[in-house]
Image (tube, rainbow, N blue to C red):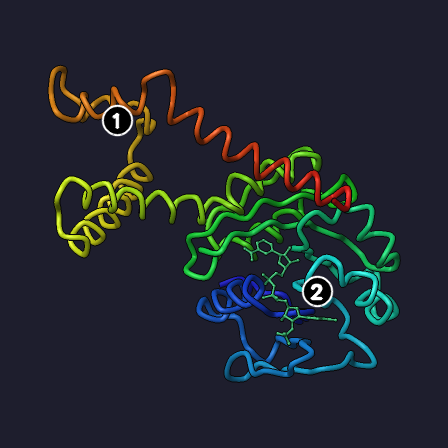
Amino acid sequence: MTDIWPDHLFLVGCGNMAGQMLARWLACGIDPARVIVLRPSGKAVADGVRVITDYPTALPAGTTVLLGMKPYQLADVAASLAPLCGADMRIFSILAGTPLADLRAALPAAGEIVRAMPNLPVGIGEGVTALYADAAVPPASRQVVEVFIAPLGLAEWIADEGQFNEVTALSGCGPAFLFRFIDAFARAGEALGLPADQAARMALATVRGSASMAALASESPAVLADRVASPGGMTRQGLNVLDADDRLLKLLTDTLAAARDRGEEMARGE
Ligand SMILES: NC(=O)c1ccc[n+]([C@@H]2O[C@H](COP(=O)([O-])OP(=O)(O)OC[C@H]3O[C@@H](n4cnc5c(N)ncnc54)[C@H](OP(=O)(O)O)[C@@H]3O)[C@@H](O)[C@H]2O)c1
């Protein structure tokens, strides 16, 4: 079988997000001996993964670097990382709101740079990772990237870097919106008189089962919804509430727009 893993993976920062990505790659078989993590705390990451608190004097040829610290730390990190970079190194940046041009300016000697916006379920292989690279990254390299990201879940290239805030609003922030939905779904059952713990279990299992079913179905979720709603029945009556004046659609559009707008404000330093 072809080896899908980079020969050497260097993580700069390994907190909530990069930690989830690495956990999944390790679970899927990357050799921990290929991985080095730099984190100021020096906290252990996983068996066999070397953790360092300062930069090495050199990185092996062909290293893939994952930038997993906070975006505002880019200048600090680049001061130490840039001299270690060569044209044979691929940089993955998960730094929210940090454009390719800033990454390129910070790490001018690095090879291909790919922006990635993962979400938290990558840790269980059910995440979504939006990817962006410019024309300097040819199709063959994009394929290597896709294969490396595939264990994390769905990978989607976006054509326009300007849409990063939109994809972040949808899939990056999405888990929080859906956690909120599941909670509200359960509390609505409780409001109708069901025991809270039972409503919580049933709400979560209903969402999980419906998402799995939709993922397997050939029809769209919109068609599936109408298919389970017979005219005059209970489901149709409930859907009528969600559908009235497109209220669910409007609520979600407003939710994503607010998240997107905040991303734009943060990019302007507000
Ligand atoms: N959380 C999300 O859902 C999400 C989604 C998509 C993208 N992102 C992006 O992921 C990045 C990390 O976010 P996070 O939520 O994972 O943050 P986090 O949990 O605070 O992790 C930050 C990591 O950076 C390390 N670090 C701190 N100072 C550093 C320095 N000077 N040099 C190198 N590493 C340093 C920390 O080290 P210690 O471990 O030693 O403290 C930690 O491992 C951000 O750029 C964010 O935009 C996050």
**Image quarter in which the C terminus is found:** top right
Residue visible at 81% across and 78% down in the picture: 58
Image location of residue 75, percent across then percent down: 83, 62
The residue to which callout 2 is attached is 65
- Above or below, 178 relative to 95: above
Hey, which quadrant is residue 22 in on the image?
bottom right
Q: Nearer the viewer, residue 221 or 133?
A: 221
Find residue 69 and report its horizontal and vertical position in percent: 68, 64
Instruction: Tell me residue 4's x, y (percent).
Output: 55, 61
Query: Which quadrant of the render holds ligand 1?
Result: bottom right
The type of residue carrying mark 2 is: Val
* Tag 1 residue: 225
Q: Residues within 10 Å of mark 2 (few under 14, many from 20)?
A: many
Reply above or below: 31 against 130.
Answer: below
For the residues marked 2 and 1, what is the alpha-carbon distance in whole angstroms? Answer: 43 Å
| Picture coordinates of residue 229, whole percent (x, y) | 18, 23
| Residue 183, placed above or below residue 43 | above
